[in-house]
Image: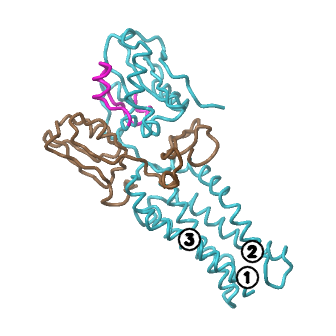
Amino acid sequence: MRYIVQPGLYALGTPDGRSPVFVTASYKMSFDRLRNGLKGRTGWILVLDTKGINVWCAAGKGTFGTAELVARIHSSGLADLVDHRRIIVPQLGAPGVSAHAVHRQSGFKVVFGPVLAKDLGEFLDAGMKAAPRTRIKDFPLRERLVLIPIELVAALKWALLPILTLAIIGGIGGREPFAAGAFQNGRFVGGAILSGLLSGAVVAPILLPWIPGRAFSTKGLVLGFISALSFLALSGRGWDNWSTRFESLAAFSLILAVVCYLSMNFTGSSTFTSLSGVRREMRWSVPVQVTLAGLGLVFWVLSRVLA
Amino acid sequence: MSRLVYIANVATLRLDPSRCCGCGMCATVCPHGVLLVVDGVAEIVHLDACMECGACANNCPSGALQVEAGVGCAAAVVNSILGRTDPSCCCVIEKPGGEASHRETPSGSSSGCC
């Protein structure tokens, strides 16, 4: 199923020359949100060609932008349909739409509406004035929860191969036959990685505001440390010989690496991280993650050698 | 809940007050309340909340604002380092009935960045 709305001009109710014009993206959900926000009202809806991408992301890419808006105003014949020269653009379209440039190039004055379409009614009733709270994009728990299934599935796919590889290594050495060793030790190391996935893709998004640290990687290390200790406490792996010690160390390093990586990756899903900040934290955290993962592998191999 | 704030002192947002025309467009479009017009001149009041989306600079008619705009996404940084064609990562997708979220793919089902 495609979530794309054909770009162009749409009528909401039975609009006339005085009805307001609302601009949105060709992503079906953006279009539906707008319609829901305008329930019971009439107006014109101008859909820009954003290739099925929502307003904010498309604005960041420039497809929801000045050039497309001006072209769409002309191609739709909007100037002949309405008597006024005013269009309402969602605020999150502003990274792509330059109001003064649109005015210069089309004669239409851009009024930026609220961040969310559900606040449009209030905005219109107040004479096209958005209350300050409707101009802020936050990142509430509700929105973070929606992301969890996506984060988790992506992480699971990504983890499958490493788990299999570590399980195969787990079958080597020791007194048990290969298959038994691979299963038993694979369960332990697989459990470690899966607990890292749960921490990084489920717990981290939920607890995001409360985990210490500003950089997401820092939050990941804090959470990873707690997760790793919890996992080791619950797994009941001993510390009585060098093989089990290295097994525990391997699990510890791997969990830290996984949680740190997944937390860092959550920057892309959040609504307040900057490119400069992400670059800054990646400069130290990617080497840390690679080192931890490498150590995990070395410890795991050592535990088998000593088994 | 306190407002979520990212790493301190990294945002590249710069304001030249001498060029500011006081129109207030920057304060209007900023989704994080970074800018405020005080006595007819814009002011950066919360630099650390800046996510470098570029909305303010794009809508400043007098060119008083500068920012290295981009998407704060680790996967996008990795992609651009690896030279993948599309440097920006993702797209927000909102599931039917769900709240807006910042990363989902247009197909609505698969993961991560597109």
Q: Which residue is mark 2?
A: A169
> Is A165 one of the magenta-colored residues?
no
> Which is more toward the observer, A64 or A190?
A64
**Which quarter of the figure is the C terminus of chain B placed in?**
top right
Say which mark, if any, is on residue A304.
1
Q: Quadrant of residue A152?
A: bottom right
In the rendered structure, are the residues bearing label 1 and label 3 in contact, judged by CB atoms less than 8 Å apart?
Answer: no
In the rendered structure, are the residues bearing label 2 and label 1 in contact, judged by CB atoms less than 8 Å apart?
Answer: yes
Q: Secondary structure at mark 1?
A: helix
Task: Please report the residue visible at 79 percent of the width from the left and 76 percent of the height from the top.
Answer: A171
Q: What count of labels does the image hold?
A: 3
- Please state which of the two labelled residues, at mark 2 or mark 3, is closer to the viewer: 2
Q: Are marks 2 and 1 on the same chain?
A: yes
Q: Earlier in the sequence, mark 2 or mark 1?
A: 2
Q: Chain of mark 3?
A: A
Q: Quadrant of residue A292?
A: bottom right
Task: Describe residue B1's horizontal placement relative to residue A54 as left or right.
Answer: left
Q: Secondary structure at mark 3?
A: helix
Residue A146 is situated, as x and y percent measured from the top left of the image, at: 56, 47
Q: Earlier in the sequence, mark 1 or mark 3?
A: 3
Q: Chain of mark 2?
A: A
- Does residue A119 lie above or below A8 as drawn? below
Q: Which residue is mark 3?
A: A256
Mark 2 neighbour density, 10 Å: few (under 14) some (14–19) many (20 or more): many
Residue bounds of the magenta highlight: A96-120
**Which quarter of the figure is the N terminus of chain B placed in?**
bottom left
Q: Amino acid at mark 2?
A: Ile
Q: Secondary structure at mark 2?
A: helix
